[in-house]
Image: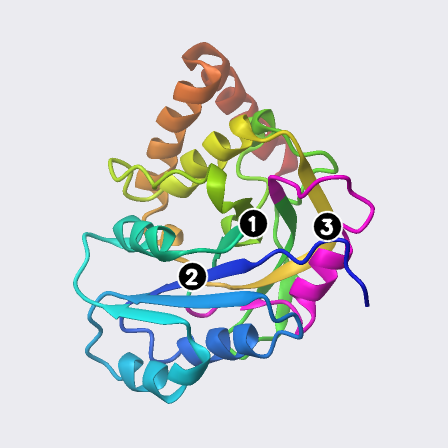
Amino acid sequence: MHYHYAPTFSIITVTYNAVETLEATIQSVISQTYHHVEYLIIDGASTDGTLAIIESYKDRITKVISEPDKGLYDAMNKGLALATGDYVCFLNAGDRLHEDDTLEKMVHSMHLLEVLPDVLYGETEIVNKAGHFVRMRRLSAPEKLTWKSFRNGMLVCHQAFFAKRALAEPYDLKYRFSSDFDWCVKIMKKSKVLHNTHLTLIDYLEEGMTTRNHKASLKERFWIMSKHYGFFSTVLYHLWFVLRALIKK
């Protein structure tokens, strides 16, 4: 296959005591048929055997750091600072690239474009621990994504949002649970070309961190939305979310 472009991808996995879920993630990255990939693992000084798994794959991993951090987004910022690829993607332990040729298909989906897009995005499948399909993610990616799309919630899963590294700012550490929402909106505000790959990109492990901190995360998201979209408009949108939920019941 001749590609018009051959962009490099920096895939970053942040781990902490992820001995049960990490291996599937590593395997989904190193088995990619597309080879312009660097893989970074940022570990928060795990004590459970996670490091032994990383060690067994170390010749396939570009860079590993293992040290204490100030939480998830601090670790993600370390990964961002080390990344050198055209695009960055954050894949949590337990999450996987959907197929072995997912990156190849993504690159192929760009072959008619005049320029490299600022953002590549696609769909997300929810899977169980065994990696089996449970359902598609409840919110699906819009045909055309803009920074205003996230008024309706996070329509693209953070893992299925590949951003040009040059546009990516560090995550804002004042948000503990929803900084990824803020990060995506900031990138989209600077983006001219957002490319829908029309592919399922990610298999997302059912039990994410946010379910445990759901309330705190929603509260943060409200303030992030107010900052980007205005307070009044955000209040109206939230009233609509509540109404919509009631109608659906």
**Residue 200 visible in image:** yes
Q: How is the image coloured?
A: rainbow
Report the front residue among 20 and 32: 32
The residue indicated by pointer 1 is: 162
Q: Which residue is mark 2?
A: 12
Residue with the mark numbered 3: 197
Question: Toward the viewer: 2 or 181?
Answer: 2
Q: Earlier in the sequence, mark 2 or mark 3?
A: 2
Q: Residue 96 occupies which quadrant of the picture?
A: bottom right
Q: Earlier in the sequence, mark 3 or mark 1?
A: 1
Which residue is pictured at 67% across the width and 58% down the height? 6
Q: Looking at numbered disc 2 in the image, what kind of residue is underneath it?
A: Ile
Local crowd at mark 3 within 10 Å, few (<14), some, or many (≥20)? some
Mark 2 → mark 1, Cα distance in angstroms = 11 Å
Residue interval drawn in magenta: 93-119
Nearer to us in this view, 58 or 74: 58
Residue type at mark 1? Phe
State which quarter of the image contains the C terminus. Answer: top right
Under circle 3, the secondary element is: strand
Residue 248 percent across, percent down from the top left: 64, 37
Point out the residue furthest to the top here: 232
Predominant secondary structure, magenta span: loop
110, above or below 2, in the image: above
Q: Secondary structure at mark 1?
A: strand
Does dot 2 land on a helix, a strand or a loop?
Answer: strand
Which amino acid is tagged 3? Answer: Thr
In reply to whether residue 96 is colored magenta, the answer given is: yes
Disc 3 to disc 1, C-alpha distance: 11 Å
